[in-house]
Amino acid sequence: MNAQKPSQTMNPATAAKKLDVYLPATPEDFRTGVVSRAEIAALQSDPPQWLRDLRAHGPHPKNLVAAKLGVSISGLARGGVGDALTTEQIDALLSEMPDWLEAERSAYRAVLRDERRVKSLHAERRRSAEQE
């Protein structure tokens, strides 16, 4: 008998996360169907126009909005930013640089510096322990 592996599928929300797109902005057939791993691979290697447009202009999901603004997702919430922003809206926020955004960017940079410091400290302790 020749047993074929069944194609693994995922729900549209998971597929949208893998593609880094905002699910409500995707086409109706994408939102209502199931997506196989092969389809995700095909979309990533040769994206259709709707996917190229979403990636270029948005709306973008919160994780990408936060990354583009240089803040955490929590910082977006504290700044009153909703679920998704377009590239144009992100660029406008960066050019306006409201007080909340400046404060959140500064706080986020401090957190990242502290995380790097702690990671370096742990690595140094591991090296020291290995030498003993």
Image (cartoon, rainbow, N blue to C red):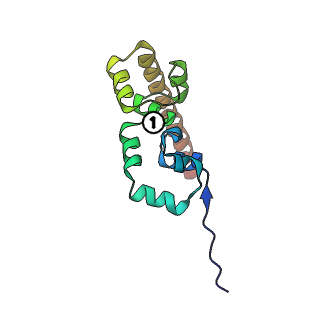
Q: Which quadrant is home to the N terminus?
A: bottom right
Question: Image point 59% across, 48% down: which residue?
Answer: 32
- Whether residue 32 can be seen here: yes
Report crowding for label 1: few under 14, some 14 to 19, many 20 or more residues within 10 A (C-alpha): many
The answer to which of 91 and 12 lies nearer the viewer is: 12
Q: Tell me the SS state at disc 1.
A: loop
Work out whether 8 lies above or below 70: below
Question: Image point 60% across, 66% down: which residue?
Answer: 7
Which residue bears the numbered disc 1? 60
Work out whether 102 lies above or below 119: above
Name the image quarter holding residue 58.
top left
Amino acid type of the residue that numbered disc 1 sits on in the rendered structure: His
Q: Where residue 56 sits: x, y (%)?
A: 35, 40
The answer to which of 120 and 64 lies nearer the viewer is: 64
Q: Where residue 102 sits: x, y (%)?
A: 41, 18
Q: Where residue 33 sits: x, y (%)?
A: 59, 53
